[in-house]
Image (cartoon, helix red, strand yellow):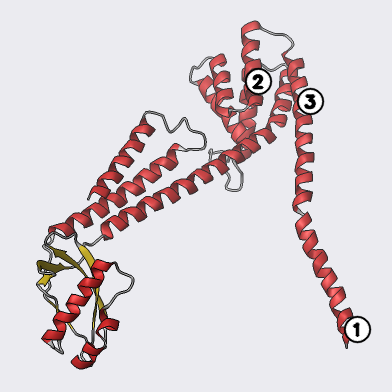
Amino acid sequence: MWLHAAIGILLLAVFIALKTGQLRKQEGIQEKSIRMFLLVAAAGNALGLFMTVRKEMDPQKEYSMLVREESGMHEEELAVISEGEKPATVRIQVPGKEKSVSAESDNNTDDFLISEKAKREREIGDEVALYNREKSDPDYYYLPDELSGKACTWTRPKDKSGILLAGLFLAGGLVVMILSGRESQKKELMRHEQMLLDYPPIIMKFTLLIQAGMSVRRTFQKIASDYQAEAGKPDGERRKKMPVRHAYEEIVIVCNELDSGVSEAEAYRHFGERCGQIKYRTFSTLLVQNLQKGSRSLADILERESEAAWEERKRKARISGETASTKLLFPMILMLLVVMAVIMVPAFAAFWG
């Protein structure tokens, strides 16, 4: 029972830490993953607690004899409680019906001595064997009422399936949390890479539209409308094969904020914060400064930013190409080994033949 209480206290501490924001501050820990862990672990602990309470409420049956089976010797696990002694779990080997009493007596040491158990369990086994040697009953295997002169009772060991179930659910919750966290990190990494790839074309479009005489607000609306027209049908439903472009989705959110009454400076600042990358933060800062100071050289600044973004993209493309060639090195070595085997095996076979 105390194990269930300990697990419950642990889960409660994790839940409180999650609510107070302590866990969200840790890098690599996702709130959704922790919630899934808490849900799975709490469900398993509750189910295990129910099973444990149900088993403990059932009265324990006391045993005084065990039935010999016709199939032969079998083993029974029993808990023996003696006065002044700690409860002990003993495995009793019960001979089958076909075994004669004389043979049982002759092989007493081999049949009833359990070498892996402690000294106390060995003594119990010896006393049980001696007690049944006196009974000489071919159908039943009796359990003595006294051990070493002390009264004792024989019961089944406590069922630990509830604790085992709670432990399995706790481990399962940890596995679910780890897998979910890795999946979230993978999605976040893919989003990060995709937004970096979309940054140069977005800046280029923005620069061209600004140079054409559009305002910053109208430029955002134009880019968002072009993306929605390309990604969706007239009724607004997204095409199934059209992937989500996160940077353009953030631009759509900017337009929605502007339409809902949010100031341009706040909308642009929110755009940089949601993207969470230095390039987009720099871009949003340029837009905010343009609104506050009224810079006339915004088009020139964006043009330089666009050129720098394209150069950065080319550099990353070269790095990706070098990485891909490195990854292909191992398959090329395997192909070389196969070609060498195809050439050398017939040659060796002809030479030795």
Residue at 84 percent across and 74 percent down: it is: 342
As displayed, is residue 290 above or below residue 118?
above
Alpha-carbon span between mark 3 and mark 1: 65 Å
Alpha-carbon span between mark 2 and mark 1: 71 Å
As displayed, is residue 320 above or below residue 131?
above
Identify the residue at the far top of this view.
Answer: 293
Residue 273, by quadrant, is top right
Residue at 26 percent across and 60 percent down: it is: 160
- Hey, what amino acid is under mark 3? Glu
As displayed, is residue 107 above or below residue 118?
below
Mark nearest the camera among 2 and 1 is: 1
As displayed, is residue 129 above or below residue 81?
below
Q: Which mark is residue 236?
A: none
Is the residue marked by circle 3 packed among few (<14), some (14-19), or many (20+) residues within 10 Å? some
For marks 2 and 1, the one nearer the N-term is 2
- Hey, what amino acid is under mark 2? Thr
Residue 98 image point, x, y percent? 22, 93
Kindly identify which residue carries mark 2: 282
Q: In the rendered image, is residue 100 in sight?
A: no
Residue at 89 percent across and 79 percent down: it is: 347
Kindly identify which residue carries mark 1: 351
The answer to whether 180 appears left or right of 314 in the picture is left
Residue 315 image point, x, y percent? 78, 35
The answer to whether 338 appears left or right of 74 in the picture is right
